[in-house]
Image: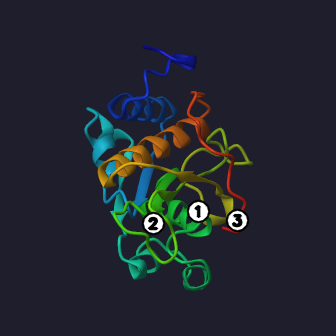
Amino acid sequence: MSGTNGVTDPSLPALAADVVRVLRDRDQTLATAESLTGGLVGATLTDVPGASAVYRGGMIVYATELKAELARVSARTLAADGPVAASTAGQLARGAATVCGADWGLATTGVAGPEPQDGHPVGQVFVSVAGPTSNGVTAGGRRGVVTDTDRWVEVRELALTGDRSAIRDQTTRAALLLLLRALGVQHPDGLSAPSSAEI
């Protein structure tokens, strides 16, 4: 079933295929930084034939210190806000794009359960996308990889339900939908309003 702008029914394989198609058409690339999804976003993308043309790679930063060491989340942000926060998610997305030399960065962090973590309930999740601008071109009209200072970031907070597997699947779906929206592909997705946090 097709949605607006030719986007197919939002199963994970269909969403991943849409992401690969749109990025390939734009000659742009993507990288990921994942915490609670543990590589599921990257695996979903690389299940798509031809994903190597657009997917640069990613990092699984499950441990808090690796969010700083690998994905460039600031120690100050982690100390003040913790690993499950809008600010952390935004820096993860930005760091993924910068470290991997990609146009776009996509990130996930949150609590998949079965127990709450550091005062955060099971199902509290943040997904984030970082890119040159909302239409994939920098303010100066350049295409391609840009620096941290050129990147904008959008973060969404989600309140998800279900077991660990369901929460991880829903997080992956939400992340891909957020990226498609940033790429200008509209789809009814039920995502919350952007979180307002200093990235």
Q: Earlier in the sequence, mark 2 or mark 3?
A: 2
Rounded to the nearest angstrom, the CA distance separating label 1 from label 3 is 9 Å
In contact (CB < 8 Å): disc 1 and disc 3: yes
> Looking at this rendering, what residue extends furthest in the top direction?
1
**Where's residue 175, x and y in %?**
48, 46
Does 70 sit above or below residue 113? below
Q: What residue sits right under mark 3 in the picture?
A: 197
Quadrant (top left/top right/bottom left/bottom right) for the N terminus: top left
> What element does badge 3 sit on?
loop
Rounded to the nearest angstrom, the CA distance separating label 2 from label 3 is 22 Å
Q: Earlier in the sequence, mark 1 or mark 3?
A: 1
Q: Nearer the viewer, residue 193 or 67?
A: 193
Crowding at label 1, few (<14), some or many (≥20) Cα neighbours within 10 Å?
A: many
Q: What residue sits right under mark 2 in the picture?
A: 99
Residue 129 visible here: no
Give the amino acid at mark 2.
Answer: Val
Give the amino acid at mark 1.
Answer: Gly
Report the side of 48 relative to 118 (left or right): left
Q: Which is in the foreground here, disc 1 or disc 3?
A: 3
In contact (CB < 8 Å): disc 2 and disc 1: no
Report the side of 181 relative to 113 (left or right): right
**Where's residue 50, x and y in %?**
29, 34
